[in-house]
């Protein structure tokens, strides 16, 4: 209960505002009531703080789940696009393979028919010419099928690179000897511009397919001059360059080869080779760099990691 102030009113001078101080002597009930109120307020404060913390945590979880769901949706869309593109590309590949095999197989059949029907009447020169054409065309078909099979095999998930070390020039002379002969038969010089001591460390089964495609294209599109192979290495990379003095490559085809892009404007006979080269170089963690202009030859460099 409240009672009089601590100081009587007469203590203060007249004319002054007299502050009022009341004593606050509580009984037991009042203290209990006050303690209950404090406890209730404390509980409410803790509950509110906890609820706000839970609300913040829940918002963070919802945000995280929303981002995760959004990312999953983007992945599904990306996978759907890749799947659609792969199916379209495989259909395109089948069409190109049928086209590329039809012409040489028809040519082989004609040569074989000519040899069978007129072999007794052929001169030595004609016989040598026809047998060489048969050899060259059948080699192209076999090489095409091997390259295609190796390329498709490299797209499998369990495919692994197999690294070995070999001298570059020796590898070209032994594994690409047929292209040296093809260049010679066409009147082209075949030059080695790197020292015989240069060695590379890579998957040579894949590099062989890349170099065969590049050499084949270089010889086919060069009617006079030379084909050259060079290489060098740095601390982090190794390089192999195929140069020719042929027709050169258009800017559009350079983009296609460097980026593995296939368009309807690209001729059927070059699409598979372009895609095989790009995919296998990517599989070896490398890149392709091209310097070329129409009518002035080409220089294609394959860059591979050490």
Image: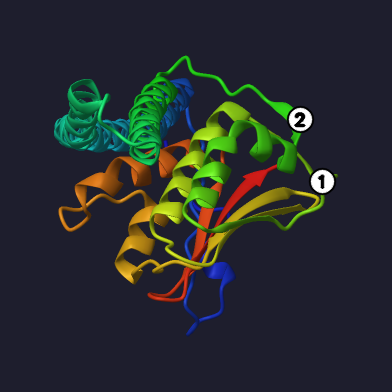
Q: In front here: 301 or 138?
A: 138
For label 1, the SS is: loop
Q: Quadrant of the C terminus?
A: top right
Q: Work out whether 19 lies above or below 147.
A: below
Q: Identify the disc placed on residue 165.
A: 2
**Residue 154 shown left or right of residue 305 in the figure:** left
Residue at x 16%, y 36% (from the top left corner): 99
Q: How is the image coloured?
A: rainbow
State the image coordinates of residue 185 (x, y, percent, origin top left): 49, 49
Residue 61 appears in which quarter of the rendering? top left
How many numbered discs, if any? 2
Q: Work out whether 305 lies above or below 61.
A: below
Q: In front here: 112 or 49?
A: 112
**Residue 195 shown left or right of residue 110 in the figure:** right
Q: Outermost residue, right direction?
A: 197
Determine the CA span between mark 1 and mark 2. 14 Å
Q: In front here: 6 or 173?
A: 173
Residue at x 30%, y 51% (from the top left corner): 261
Residue at the spot of label 1: 196
For label 2, the SS is: strand
Residue at x 39%, y 53% (from the top left corner): 220
State the image coordinates of residue 175 (x, y, percent, origin top left): 61, 31
Q: Is residue 3 visible?
A: no
State the image coordinates of residue 104 (x, y, percent, origin top left): 24, 34
Residue at x 65%, y 39% (from the top left corner): 172
Disc 1 or disc 2, which is closer to the eye?
1
Residue 194 appears in which quarter of the rendering? bottom right
């Amino acid at each position: 209960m409240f009672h009089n102030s601590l100081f009587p009113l007469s203590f203060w001078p007249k004319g002054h505002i007299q502050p009022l101080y009341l004593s606050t002597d509580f009984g037991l009930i009042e203290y209990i009531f006050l303690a209950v109120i404090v406890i209730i307020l404390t509980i409410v404060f803790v509950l509110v703080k906890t609820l706000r913390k839970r609300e913040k945590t829940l918002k963070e979880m919802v945000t995280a789940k929303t981002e995760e769901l959004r990312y999953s949706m983007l992945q599904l869309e990306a996978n759907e696009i890749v799947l659609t593109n792969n199916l379209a590309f495989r259909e395109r590949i089948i069409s190109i393979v049928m086209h590329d095999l039809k012409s040489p197989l028809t040519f082989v059949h004609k040569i074989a028919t000519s040899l069978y029907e007129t072999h007794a009447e052929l001169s030595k020169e004609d016989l040598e010419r026809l047998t060489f054409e048969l050899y060259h065309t059948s080699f192209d078909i076999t090489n095409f099928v091997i390259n295609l099979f190796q390329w498709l095999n490299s797209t499998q998930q369990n495919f692994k690179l197999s690294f070995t070390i070999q001298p570059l020039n020796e590898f070209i002379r032994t594994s690409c000897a047929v292209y040296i002969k093809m260049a010679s038969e066409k009147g082209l010089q075949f030059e080695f511009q790197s020292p015989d001591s240069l060695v590379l460390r890579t998957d040579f089964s894949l590099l062989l397919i890349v170099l065969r495609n590049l050499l084949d294209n270089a010889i086919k599109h060069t009617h006079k001059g030379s084909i050259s192979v060079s290489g060098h290495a740095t601390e982090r990379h190794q390089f192999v360059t195929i140069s020719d003095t042929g027709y050169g490559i258009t800017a559009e085809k350079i983009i296609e080869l460097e980026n593995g892009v296939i368009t309807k404007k690209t001729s059927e006979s070059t699409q598979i080779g372009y895609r095989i080269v790009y995919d296998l170089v990517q599989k070896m963690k490398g890149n392709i760099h091209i310097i070329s202009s129409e009518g002035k030859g080409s220089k294609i460099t394959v860059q591979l990691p050490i």
